[in-house]
Image (cartoon, helix red, strand yellow):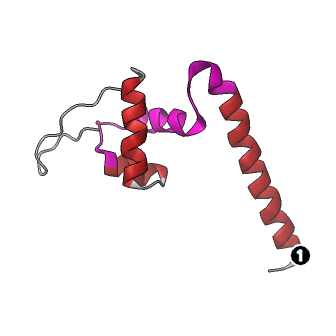
Amino acid sequence: MTDLQERFSGALHNTSRAWRQALDRRLKFLGLSQASWMTIAVAAKARTPCRSPKLADRLGVEGATMVSMVDRLVKAGLVIREPSPPIGESSESY
């Protein structure tokens, strides 16, 4: 990697980190983090409710991370968890 590429990579990483921190500060009064806000945003944009594994895939996190995030959001009253129909039926739930 060239020096320019390394500097660009470092700057991109620092910008991303600063963005997440700024979002966390702005959302703190709502009791949200950037991760919880993104989870809500992705779920809200879905055309149909989606299962936790699909939501995790869309957010680029592990399944266990997504389950605990959804648990916290349900407890806070920000999302509703519905039972999933058997696999193979058209509707999905999270």
Residue 13 is left or right of residue 44, and the answer is right
Q: Residue at x 68, y 41 (%)?
A: 20
Residue 12 appears in which quarter of the rendering? bottom right
Residue 35 appears in which quarter of the rendering? top right
The residue at which mark 1 appears reads as 3
Residue 79 is left or right of residue 12, and the answer is left
Residue 4 appears in which quarter of the rendering? bottom right
In the rendered image, residue 11, in percent from the top left (x then y), is placed at 82, 57
Examine the residues drawn in magenta and state their main secondary structure.
helix
In the rendered image, residue 94, in percent from the top left (x then y), is placed at 29, 38
Check residue 37 for magenta coloring: yes
In the rendered image, residue 30, in percent from the top left (x then y), is placed at 58, 20
Quadrant where the image shows the N terminus: bottom right
Residue 17 is left or right of residue 94, and the answer is right
Residue 77 sits above or below residue 58 on the image: above
Q: Which residues are the magenta region?
A: 26-52
